[in-house]
Image: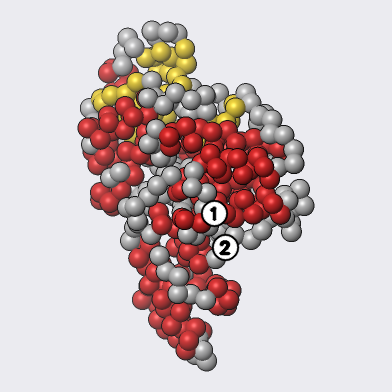
Amino acid sequence: MTDWLAASHFPLLEPVLDAALELAPEDRDAFVLRMTETNPALRLELNALLRYAARMADLPLLDQSASAVFSSLLRDDADVGVRVLESALAGRYAMIRPLGAGGMATVYLAIDLRVDRQVAIKVLRPDLSRTVGAERFAREVQVVATLDHPNIVGALDSGEAEGHFWLVMPFIDGESLRQRLVRDGARPLDEALSIAHQVADALGYAHRRGVMHRDIKPDNILLSNGHAFVADFGIARAIQSNAHALTNTGMSVGTPAYMAPEQAAGSKDLDERVDVYALGSVLYEMLAGTPAFTGPNRMAIMVRAQHTDPRPIHPVRAAVTPALDAVILKAMSRTPTERYATMSAFRDAIAAASTIPCPRPS
């Protein structure tokens, strides 16, 4: 964590920082010298920010979650491994079609032949499967299988087929929150509050059982028939528990726009407040129509999140009261101890600051 930067200086540095981060590393020194020729003090702060950004670039981060399959286009290689799966799962599951592919996995629609119901089978990339390891994957899936909550997409079955780790989940016939935001933009206040309340319920339940998610984002929140579901508990936990090994696969863990600063900085001392921060970020985006922090690349986003506070939403959307603004900003505090200590406390604060009931999302 770096708290040395004066908050009043960051607006001066921001455009220069963005431009510097767009350059090749070997070209940055000359650019910084030219842009701060008359202000050596700002030059020192800018160089410190660039060093911080360089350290962030070395950390493994995930820019696309496994649940992005619900909002991504089908890839040409979406049927990779399908023949292996059909052979391994014959008599148990009938593969129907690929639903999509994300950065870490391909998802197939299938029929569970034992109970005649539709399920989703998520298959990790073989290189990612090797990195995670069978024992770790099985252990994390077992943990998630114990979670029984109406707003959590649970694990029904799992296994390995010729290096392909697979996970069977209930099929959610709907869309991701990411899809809805991309299509329709900022959400009505009652819908946003309802989604946040349901997700907070699910996360609070998991936290009380010692299970953090650590990858909450719109892609991992699924919407169907008036319900919000939190997806990818098992995969998120398995991947992030072996994050540093992913550098050999070209994969990365975490999504800058929703990561708490301590998580983005690579801290190993994480607790449920990283999920509080992430859900606060999601609620902010649902109400503002844009993430709290944006930038030309992930390094710029992380630097902003580390050194600035989100802008209040109330000035641009009157339906968001100052009280609700304050709740969201507290959840997104850069300092963990200044956030809500529990997800339940965050949920209750949202309810207390709301002047309308929270019906289920449509």
Image-based side of 175 in relation to 148, left or right: right
Locate residue 358, reporting x and y percent: 68, 34
Image coordinates of residue 15 in percent, x first then y, are: 56, 73
Q: Residue at x 55, y 73 (%)?
A: 7
Three-letter amino acid code at disc 2? Asp
| Proximity of marks 1 and 2: CB atoms separated by less than 8 Å | yes
In this rendering, the answer to whether 171 lies above or below 231 is above
Left or right, residue 315 beside residue 332:
right
- The residue that disc 2 covers is 309
Residue 64, horizontal then vertical, whole percent: 44, 45
Residue 128 image point, x, y percent = 29, 40
Asked if one can make out residue 19 in the rendered structure from this viewpoint, the answer is no
Image position of 133 (left or right of 321): left
Sequence-earlier tag: 1 or 2: 2
Position of the C terminus, as image quadrant, is top right
| Depth check, front residue: 158 or 189 | 189
Task: Please tell me how many numbered marks the rendered image carries.
Answer: 2
Between 35 and 265, which is closer to the camera in this rendering? 265
Seen from the viewer's position, the closer of residues 92 and 202 is 202
Q: Amino acid at mark 1?
A: Met
The circle drawn on residue 332 is 1
Furthest-bottom residue in this view? 38
Q: Secondary structure at mark 1?
A: loop
